[in-house]
Image (cartoon, rainbow, N blue to C red):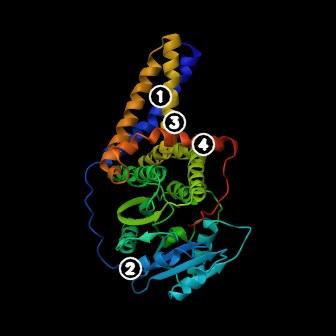
Amino acid sequence: MTVLSAILGTLSVLILVPVTVLLVQVLMALPAYRHSPLPQGRRSPVGILIPAHDEADVIAATLGSILPQLTEGDRLLVVADNCSDETAAIVRGLGAEVVERTDLERRGKGYALDFGVGRMRDDPPEVVIIIDADCQVFPGTIDRLARTCVAASCPVQSLDLMLSPEGACLKTRIAEFAWLVKNQVRPLGFYRLGLSCQLMGTGMAFPWSLISNAALASGHIVEDMKFGIDLALAGYPALFCPDATVTSYFPSDKTAEGTQRTRWEHGHLSMILHEFPRVLACAIRERNVRLLGLAIDLVVPPLALLALIVTAIFSLNLMLFLFEGITWPLNLSLITLGLFAIAITIAWYGWGRKVISFLAMLTIPFYILSKTTLYLRFLTKRQKSWVKTERD
C-alpha cells in the first residue's frame, strides 16, 4: 500500500459517513407522513417574536398570516431593528405591538431577539415563537407549535420551506430542491428515528424557561444553528414538528440570493469545523444517542459541496487505479457515488418532482460547478459576520 492510496482510501471512508447518513434519512422519510394528533388541553399563552430589519415590503403579509391565529392572552411583538424604512409604522397601523431598536455597532438577528425577549420579561408567556419577518405562517401552525412545545418541554422546529418566486430560473429551482431535502426530508427521517433536528431560524418555539436565560445577543452568521447546538448540549435538543409549516421565497435578485446563500453555506461549514468535534465528544462521553444523531446530521455538508467532494475523490481514485492499478479506494468511491445517487434520486422522486423535472435534474452538475467559487471563498475570504439579505 502506497502513502497516496492510504490517504485516498481514508478520504473515501470518511466521505462515506455523510453519504450514508443522507441515504438513511431519505429512506426513513420515504413512507407517506400521517399527521400526528394535536396535543389536547388548554393552549398556553404564547409570545410571537418577529425580528425585522427594513421589512416594509413584506411585514404586512407576515402579520396577516399570524394575527388570525392568536387567541386571548397571546402577545405579538415586532422588533424594528435598525430600520430606515416604514417597518415600524406599518406594524403600528395593523394594530400590532412594535419596539424600535437602534444600535449600529451591535447588528444582527441575535441582538434583535435578545432585545425582544427582554421586553417580554414584564409579562412572560409560557412559550415564545420566533418568526422571520418575511414568512407566511400556515393556519394552525401557532397552535401546533405552542401545544407541542409545552407537551415536549423542549425547543420545537416547524417545517421551514423556501420557495422559488414565479418565473424563477432553473438555478433557483434547484436550490429549492436542495432546501427541501435539507429542511424537510432529512429532519423527517431523523424524526421517525426518534432523533432531534437542527434549528432553522424561523418557526421555532421555546419554553420561556429556556429562551429567557439564553445567550441570544450575537452577530453570529448562523445564530439559529449555533443556538440549537448550544441547547442540545445543555440537554434540550430540538424536536421537529412536520405538522407546522412556515414558508418564504428566495430573493429574485441574483446579488441578494448570492449573499444569502454565502451566509448560509459558509455558516454551515463553520459549524461543521467548530461544533462537530464538540458535539461528538459530548455524545460519546455521555453515551447520548440524540446528541450522536445531531453530530452525524451536522457533519452532512450542503448537497452541492457533498457532490463535489464525492466526485473529486472518485476522480482521484480513478487516476490512482489507472496509473498504479490499486483498486480498493476506487471500489469504495464507486459505492459512495452509488449511494449518493440513490439518495438524491429517491429524494427527487418522493418530494422534488413538484419542484424540478427529470430533465432539469440532468443539469445539476452544472449547478454544482457554479458553486465551486463559493466554496473556495470559504477558504480564502470566508464570510464571518451577519449580512442582511435585501428583499426585492
**Label 1 crowding class (10 Å Cα cut-off): few <14, some 14-19, many 20+?**
few
**Mark toward the start of the polypeptide (3 vs 4):** 3
**Mark toward the start of the polypeptide (1 vs 3):** 1
Per the image, the residue denoted by label 3 is 308
**Label 2 crowding class (10 Å Cα cut-off): few <14, some 14-19, many 20+?**
some
Q: CA distance from mark 1 to mark 2?
A: 49 Å
Q: CA distance from mark 3 to mark 4?
A: 10 Å
Q: CA distance from mark 1 to mark 4?
A: 22 Å
**Mark toward the start of the polypeptide (3 vs 2):** 2
SS state under label 1: helix
At a point 45% along the width and 15% down the height, the residue shown is 327
Residue 275: horizontal and vertical position, in percent?
57, 47
Per the image, the residue denoted by label 1 is 13
* Residue at the extreme right: 105
Callouts 3 and 4 close, C-beta under 8 Å: yes
Nearer to the camera, 67 or 3 = 67
**Mark toward the start of the polypeptide (1 vs 2):** 1
Per the image, the residue denoted by label 2 is 69
Q: Amino acid at mark 2?
A: Gln
Using the image, determine if residue 79 lies above or below residue 390.
Answer: below
Callouts 1 and 2 close, C-beta under 8 Å: no
Which one is closest to the eye, mark 1 or mark 2?
A: 2
Residue 86: horizontal and vertical position, in percent?
61, 81
**Mark toward the start of the polypeptide (1 vs 4):** 1
